[in-house]
Every structure is written in structure tokens, then in C-alpha cells.
Image (cartoon, grey):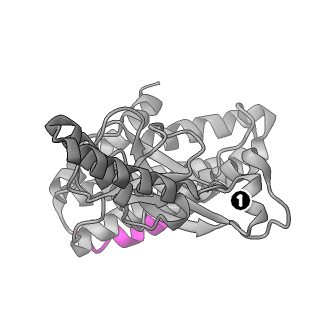
Amino acid sequence: MFFGVTSRSARGISAAVALLAIGAVGCADAIDSAKAGAKKAVRTRSVFSLAPGDCYNPNSGATESEEFSVEIVPCEEAHEGQVVGEFDIEGEKEYPGDDGATAIADKQCPAVSQKFVSDTWAIPEGVDLFYYYPTSESWKTGDRAVSCAYAKESGTFSGSLANKSLTADQAAYLKGSNAVYEALWNNQPEAEQPEDDLAGYKKQAKAVSEALNTHLTALKGVEQPQTVKLRSQLTETAEAWEDAASAGNVDDFYIAYDLGFTGIDPTKTVAARKELKLATTVPADDAEVWAG
């Protein structure tokens, strides 16, 4: 969120005045242009007022920039982003700085957004998770809000990303699957190699194994053939992660981790997803990670 959003009113007035003045001289092209400007002015809102579900275009024309206001548009129209969740930064007496604020948003936005978009595989290509967060100036005014949004850096997309009605089997699968990958990435140690932080990597492995076991419990209620097959494969994968979590040395950890990481390769879930009538195209970022 950014301080100094009073420019919205000035923009609205100037657009309306331009429409009246140009209309008087009867220039059709200018009238159309002015009408478009007036329409945008009416739709312009402060970034402070963004709410989950809002589809918008950043007035700066960029997804990564300081934003004072955005143009709110109907979701069926082409737009650059949609707000999919929000939360307040808590437990910080002082402004955490850009790095601190982005670290908080990086950690919380993926989980917050899942309440709005359960199946990230269904998100259009090129649409990624972004967020608006407080600046040092807006923090002084009491701003603590972070708005999480899926947006395109280039181009637009149409339609709302909101969850469609899910069957019980779809909901059970997505809840467990999302939790597994959330456990993996949210517990990723800063050290690049297990040799430098074996305890941290074992902690990550424990979190993944626990998430997998919860996922497996939920999948017991899904009796579709490909999902049953996936559950059997994930049972072995969960054991590998448990072995990694209890490894006595780096070599044992590597052996178990390799089996566990390979076992949660997203491509292995495509058949079950197809059976459950969920999206089946592996997101490009995930495909790249497991292809490497």
C-alpha cells in the first residue's frame, strides 16, 4: 500500500471536464477518447480499498512498482490482475523494511490465496502471485495490510480466478496436495546444501512427511482408480521423507531425500488429476524445478 492516494479525485475531475469541453466542439474521436478516460476515472480506486475478488489494472502500467491507485474492472473484461486474499502484518512494532515486508508476504500470500484459488494449476499461463504491501510512509498512518494478487507482468487475462464449486473428492485432493508443497517450500533452508545445515533439511523433511501423511489419510476416502494408485505411490514417498527426517548422516539423508523429492514430482499426479477432472498442465515453474 502506498501513501499519497489523493490524486484519484483530481484525475476524476479533469477527465470529466475534458469530456464536456471536447464534446462541445463535436470531435468524435476525441469524444470517444474522453469517454474512455472518464470511464477509467470512475473506476479508479485507492489501493487501500482493494478487496479479495477485485479485478484491476495498475494505473502505473506495471505490476512491480509503487502504486497509488488502480482501475477496478469487471472480471469478465480484460485485466492485468485480481486480488485473491489479504492479511495484516502483525507482531511488528516498527516498519520491517522492504525486505521484511516482502519476506512476510512471500510466506503468507501463497497460503492466503489458496482460500480463493484452490487449484493453482488452473491459473492462466504467465499469471503469477504478486502483492501490495505497506511502505514506510503508509506504515506511519497505521497501514498494515497486504493484498495478495495474481497478475500478469505483460498482457491481460479475462475471467475470475475464484474457486468453482468443487466435489468432495476434488476438495480433499487439493487441500492435501497444496499442503505438501507448502510444507516443502515454506521450510526450505537458506543453506544450499544439506552439508551446511543438516538439521534444517531434516526439519523440512519432517514437515513434508507430516503433510504427506495427512494427505494420505484424506485420500483414503477417494476410491477412484488413479487416485488409489497415486495414494500407494505417495505412501512409499512419505516413508522416504520420514527416513530423511531421521537420517543419522548426510549420506543417508541424500539417499532418502532423492527418493522423497522424486516421489512428489507433480507429473506423477497428472493421471489422478485427470480422473478428478482437475487441471492437468503442470505449472511451468514446477516443471522446471523437477526437470532440473
Residue in the image at 73% along x and 39% along y: 190
Residue 73, position in %: x, y? 30, 57
Most extreme residue toward the front is 25
Percent x, y for residue 44?
41, 57
Is 74 located above or below residue 130 in the figure? below
In the image: residue 254, left or right of residue 280: right
The magenta stretch spans residue 172? no
**Can the viewer see residue 246 in this picture?**
no
- Few, some or many C-alpha atoms within 10 Å of disc 1 (few <14, some 14-19, many ≥20)? some
Instruction: Tell me the residue that label 1 is attached to.
Output: 138
The main secondary structure of the magenta stretch is: helix
Question: What is the magenta range?
Answer: 213-222
In the rendered structure, which amino acid carries the disc numbered 1?
A: Ser
Depth check: give the residue in front, 11 or 115.
11
Residue 241 position, x and y percent, is 56, 50
**On screen, residue 44 above or below 185:** below
Q: Against 97, is 286 above or below?
A: above
Q: Residue at x 16, y 57 (%)?
A: 277
Q: Quadrant of residue 5?
A: bottom right
Q: How many marks?
A: 1
Helix, strand or loop for disc 1: helix
Q: Residue at x 44, y 32 (%)?
A: 290
